[in-house]
Image (tube, rainbow, N blue to C red):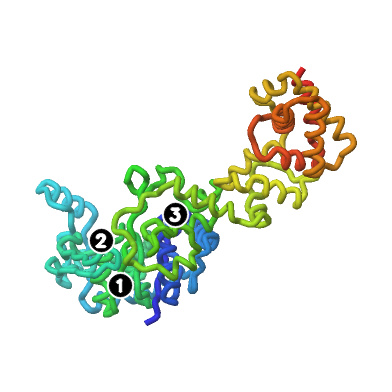
Amino acid sequence: MTVRVRIAPSPTGNLHIGTARTAVFNWLFARHHGGKFILRIEDTDLERSRPEYTENILEGLRWLGLNWDEGPLFQSQRLDLYKEAVQKLLDQGLAYRCYTTSEELEALREAQKARNEAPRYDNRHRNLTPEQRAAFEAEGRSYVIRFKIEDGREIVWNDLVRGKMSWRGSDLGGDMVIARASEEGSGQPLYNFVVVVDDIDMQITHVIRGEDHIANTAKQILLYEALGANIPDFAHAPLILNMDGRKLSKRDGVTSIFDFKQLGFTAEALVNYMTLLGWSPPDSTQEIFTLEAAAKEFSFERVNKAGAKFDWAKLDWLNSQYIHSTPVDKLTDLLIPFWQAAGYKFDGGRTRPWLEQLVALISQSLTRLVDAVPMTQLFFRDIEFSDEASTQLKQEGSATALKGIITALESQPQLSETSAQDIIKQVVKGQNVKKGLVMRSLRAALTGDVHGPDLIQSWLLLNQIGLDKSRLNRAITEAN
Ligand code: GLU
């Protein structure tokens, strides 16, 4: 048997972290078994589906490296298939037209509520006579197609994550609606039904999805039986929870994949983190791995039943590990969009080699890519002196030291690491001052601050774009 799995997002919003994590588990399982990973866009809800969300979903999956083998298939292009299946169930007497009006359903719900019963359809139109049906039609009532669910049925499956699951037919809310009325007669098919028709048609062997679909699975198993198809295996992945233990939602701020990208997470770190949201590798000390490496080890035996808490600190840590090991040229490519978004311009000598030097200077201090923006501001924008920097510049000997540096620079317009060190030594010796004073004053003058990246390297970078002398001069004015 070839493993065939699918991710089936609805394009009613941007690619969500929960959907992406489900995609990760599907991808890992498919790759582990040398199977196929299929992408299906569930766009039957015409009112809420939007092409831009489809685009966002495809782009997000690509960005994360979750390449698919077949698709995207669009449900909206497969309506004939669903109609045929509805007709098959109608012909076999497994489904029927239900003419109950919304007012009648509302009255039913109220009565059930008054008796403290769970709301359910009472199957009242299951056995209409041809005359009754004709009378409803004559009244001009519209109908839905309901699939018969026997109350006494027990539905059991062995969930790959949760073990033995058992549901009673009576817990499923009565005969279920599988299609709404439409002019063509067989109706506009609904979610639970089309999922099954598609999964049968696409020969899906394992349905891997979020735990929020468990109740659907019970209903869907009955539909597989009715349609005479093999029932796939099911694996329900745990939900992603926020730190308070509640389902991660829009209220937690960031939930769409591109929000994470904008916050400065790399695709590799994010996808690595998502594999750990509910799964742990056999060697649980191992935390950093590529998707391919995880695929080798992946099995549902190591997927937790309990919800997976979203841990920002851990994601940050993983992200920093990835950034710190990214080669400078690639990291430069990743950072350029963040600098551009901040309005930084690559002019005045800020060439690609210069940018790469800058990246080498800060790379080990980055946790998120976006951290590069404030960290490198002093290389792109005019500086202001912080209070501490001003105090430093007013220290006795500071201005004189800076003047000494300017004089030395006259004979060394093109700085190198060695000549920069020499200039400092020369000033320390010539003026008989502490090296610390010279270094601190130089940092304050060049960067406007008393902390920051390596001073000599920063100076070299500023020297290359011709900013060091003017800043030294300005600092001397500030010192007086
Ligand atoms: N369209 C469903 C969702 O986005 C997919 C459900 C399934 O995987 O069967 O939740």
Amino acid, disc 2: Ala
Give the class, few, some or many, for how many residues have Cα within 10 Å of label 2's Cα (few <14, many ≥20). few
| Residue occupying the point 53% across, 57% down | 267
Amino acid under label 3?
A: His
Q: Quadrant of residue 177?
A: bottom left
In which of the image's four quarters is ligand 1 placed?
bottom left
Q: Residues within 10 Å of mark 3 (few under 14, many from 20)?
A: many
Q: Is residue 469 above or below residue 162?
A: above
Q: CA distance from mark 3 to mark 2?
A: 21 Å
Q: Which residue is farthest bottom?
A: 1
Q: Nearer the viewer, residue 138 or 97?
A: 97
- 473 relative position to 130: left or right: right
Is the CB of mark 2 within 8 Å of ligand 1?
A: no
Q: Nearer the viewer, residue 473 or 112?
A: 473
Q: Distance from label 1 to label 3 (Cα)?
A: 24 Å
Which residue occupies the extreme left position in the image?
Answer: 115
First in sequence, mark 1 or 2: give its number.
2
In the rendered image, the residue lying farthest to the right is 411
Residue picked out by circle 1:
233
Q: Which mark is residue 215?
A: 2
Q: For mark 3, what is the residue?
A: 16
Quadrant the C terminus occupies? top right
The earlier-in-sequence mark between 3 and 2 is: 3
- Left or right: residue 384 versus residue 233 is right
Residue at image x 26%, y 72%?
223
Residue at x-position 31% and y-position 59%:
304
As helix, strand or loop, the secondary structure at mark 2 comes to helix
Nearer the observer: mark 1 or 2; the answer is: 1
